[in-house]
Amino acid sequence: MKAVAVYPRKQGPVHLREVKKPIPTNGEVIIRALEVGVCGTDREIVNGLYGDAPYGSDFLILGHESLGIAESDGVDVKKGDMVVATVRRPCPEHCLNCTRGEIDMCLTGNYREKGIKGLHGFMTEYYTEDPKYLVRVPHDLRHVAILLEPLSVVEKVIEQIFKIQKRLAWEPRTALVLGAGPIGLLSTFVLRDIGIATYTFARSPSGRLNDRLLEESGAHYLSATDTPLSYIPSKVGQIDLIVEATGSASLPFEAIGVLGINGIIALTGIAGQGRILEIDTSCINLKIVLENKLVFGSVNANKSHFETGVRRLKSIEERWPGVLRNMITRRVPIQRSQEALEKGDSDMKVVIEV
Amino acid sequence: MKAVAVYPRKQGPVHLREVKKPIPTNGEVIIRALEVGVCGTDREIVNGLYGDAPYGSDFLILGHESLGIAESDGVDVKKGDMVVATVRRPCPEHCLNCTRGEIDMCLTGNYREKGIKGLHGFMTEYYTEDPKYLVRVPHDLRHVAILLEPLSVVEKVIEQIFKIQKRLAWEPRTALVLGAGPIGLLSTFVLRDIGIATYTFARSPSGRLNDRLLEESGAHYLSATDTPLSYIPSKVGQIDLIVEATGSASLPFEAIGVLGINGIIALTGIAGQGRILEIDTSCINLKIVLENKLVFGSVNANKSHFETGVRRLKSIEERWPGVLRNMITRRVPIQRSQEALEKGDSDMKVVIEV
C-alpha cells in the first residue's frame, strides 16, 4: 500500500513509497484512512527542521491529523466506526501525566508523536491503533471531522484558560485572537460558541475567506492594515483573554500591552529559532506584575480534548453551517501529496485524500 | 504629632512635619504606630518616580508596612490589640474584585494604596483605620510582625501558584527563588515551610547574612559568582517553580530556559522602565509553548494573605527561631527617617521606630 514519507532532518520533497499493510496485534484495530490534514508542523518536517523516524527506520510516514474507518472491532470501537486518532503516545518512563492519559503534559519530554516524533503517521492507506487512542466521530460530521485534531489543540487552550483563571474572580466578556489561520479561526469559533465577544486580528486586508467565515460566527475581523494592535483596546474595551496563533516572535510581547488587568494570554505558535528581538522591558515585568497578568504556552491535546471537540464540531455545524467545511480550501489525492505540502496563498486547511 | 512625608513626583529627601492627630469616625479605630517597614517602593516614591498625594493635599505621608496598637475598640478589634493594616482600599467603581475584598485584583486600576497612591501612609504617630482592613497579630510576634506586609505579598504568590497549577497533575518538588532580598528570603522560608526543596540564587558571593539565614531553613544558596543561572538545572534537577524577586529586566527571560516542563514562574519584581533588551526568541515562545510553561505577575495581597501570613510567621519562628528577626538589619527612629530610606550595603529590612 502507498504511504507519504520523508527522510527526517533532510529537506524534502516527500516521496510516495510502498509499505506493507500493517497487521493489528494486542487488541489493536485496523483503520482505513479517509483523509489526512496538513499543518505547519508537517511543512517544517518536510523542510528538514523537525521530525524523527521510528527506531530502526530511516524514513518517517507523515501525517498526524487523521480521519478513518475502523475495519475491525476493538474495545469501544466497532467495525465501520468513523475514528480520529490522538497524536501523542506515552513516554517509556511512564511519568505522572502520561500514566493519567494526559500525555500532552508529559513530564519527561520523551513522549512519541504519530507522524512527527518516533512513530509513523497517518498518510497511508491503512494503519493500526490501540483503541484507547481512538475517538469515535458521528458519520454526519464526515466532511468536517478532519478538523478534529487542530480543534483539540484549541479545546485544550480554552480549557486551560478557564482552569487557570479559577485563581481569581473572573467574568470574561471580550477575547482577542491573534491570527486567522486554522488555529486562529477554530479558536474564534470556540470562543463564540461559549458566548464571548471575539475580535480576530490578522495581517490580511478585510474581505478574504477567513474573515468572512469568522464574521458568520459573530466575531469581528480586525485587519492590521486598518487597526494597529495597540489601538484595539480603545476600540473594543478591556480585553480579558488573548489567544496568540500567529507564531510571531514579537506579537506575544505586544499583546501583553493590550491585555486588560488580570488577563491571560495563551501562546500556541512557535517563532523561528534564534531570532533576536529588541524589547522594551517596561511592557513586560511592569505590566505583568502590576496588573496580575498571566502568559502560558499550550501544545498538543489529550483524548478528553478530542471528545470535547466532537461535541464542538456538532455545535458549530448547527449554529453556523458551512463555516467549518469552508475552512478546507483544497483536497489533494495522496499521489500528489507534495502539492498539498506546498502552501498556496489562499490556502486555509489543505487535506490529503487517501 | 510627627509624620514622615514627601512631595510626590518630586525627588526627596523626606521631611518630618507636624500633622493633627486624626479622630476616628464611622466605626474606625485609632492606632498608635509601633514600627513602619521601608521597601523599594518607598525609595521610588522618595526619588520622585512614583506616588500620589491624597486629593486636596500636596504632600503624602509615606509608609505601607505597618505595625501598631489599637487604642480604641472596633468590630473584631479591641483596645490593646496589636494590628497590621492592609495596604489597598477599593476603587470608587466597586469592581467585581474590590467588592469581594480582593482589592489586590482590582479591575479598574483605581484602587488607592496607603502611603503610595492617594492615601496617607503609616509613618506617623497615630492613624485611624476601618477595622475591616486590620489584621490582629499575637503579641508574641511583636519583633517580627513588621514583616507581615511583605510576607502577605509572598503568601499571595504562593497561593496563586498552587491555584493556577490545579490546571494539571502537578507534584512540585524543587523551587528556585531569584533574589535574596526581603521578598526572596520570605519566599524561600514559605517554600521551605511547605516542604519544597528550595534553591535561592542571587548575585552576592556566599557567606553573607541573607545566605546564612536561608540555609537555616534548609534552603541552598547559589551565588551567581559560582553558578551561572543556566547551570542550575544540571545541578539540582527539574525545577518546578520559580519565584523571581530581583526586578531584573533580563532574568525572567533567562528563567524560562531553566524552568522544567509544565513549570510556573511568578514575577514579583519590576524592572526599570524603558530599558531595551535583546532577547533570543527561541527561549521564549518555543520553550513556553512546547513545554506548557506559564509566567504570571503578582502584586499586593488581600486580607486573607495577611491572615495566612500571621500563621506563617508563627510557624517560621517555631521551626527556625531568629531567621525572621535577623532579617531586620536596622531600626531607625522616626526623627532620622531619611537615613532609613537610604539603602545601606548590608541592609536587608530597615524599620522606622515611631
Image (tube, coloured by chain):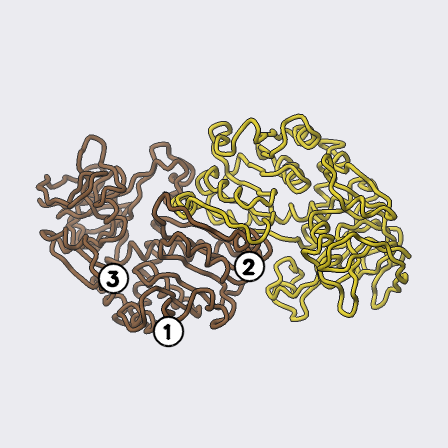
Chain colours: A brown, B yellow
Q: Is residue B6 visible?
A: yes
Tag 1 or tag 2, which sits nearer the N-term?
Answer: 1
In the rendered image, the vertical position of residue A353 relative to residue A19, given as above or below: below
* Residue drawn at point x = 30 percent, y = 63 percent: A313
* Residue drawn at point x = 28 percent, y = 42 percent: A113
Name the residue that disc number 3 marks.
Answer: A348
How far is disc 3 from disc 2 in space, using C-alphas?
33 Å
At mark 3, the secondary structure is: loop
Q: Position of residue A203 (x, y in %)?
A: 34, 64
Instruction: Give the label, 1 or 3, closer to the camera.
Output: 3
Name the residue that disc number 2 marks.
Answer: A262
Tag 2 or tag 3, which sits nearer the N-term?
Answer: 2
The chain carrying label 1 is: A
Question: Which of the numbered marks, if any, corresponds to residue B296?
Answer: none
Q: Residues within 10 Å of mark 1 (few under 14, many from 20)?
A: some
Question: Which of the numbered marks, if any, corresponds to residue A218?
Answer: 1
Q: Is residue B78 visible?
A: no
Kind of residue indicated by mark 3: Met
Query: Where, by quadrant of the figure, is residue B348 drawn?
Result: top right
Q: Position of residue A285 (x, y in %)?
A: 55, 51
How far is disc 2 from disc 1 in space, using C-alphas?
25 Å
In the rendered image, the vertical position of residue B87 relative to residue B333, given as above or below: below
Q: Residues within 10 Å of mark 3 (few under 14, many from 20)?
A: many
Asked if disc 2 and disc 1 are in contact, CB closer than 8 Å, the reply is no
Kind of residue indicated by mark 1: Gly
Q: How many marks?
A: 3
Q: In this rendered view, identify the residue nearer to me: A225 or A124.
A: A225
Asked if disc 1 and disc 3 are in contact, CB closer than 8 Å, the reply is no
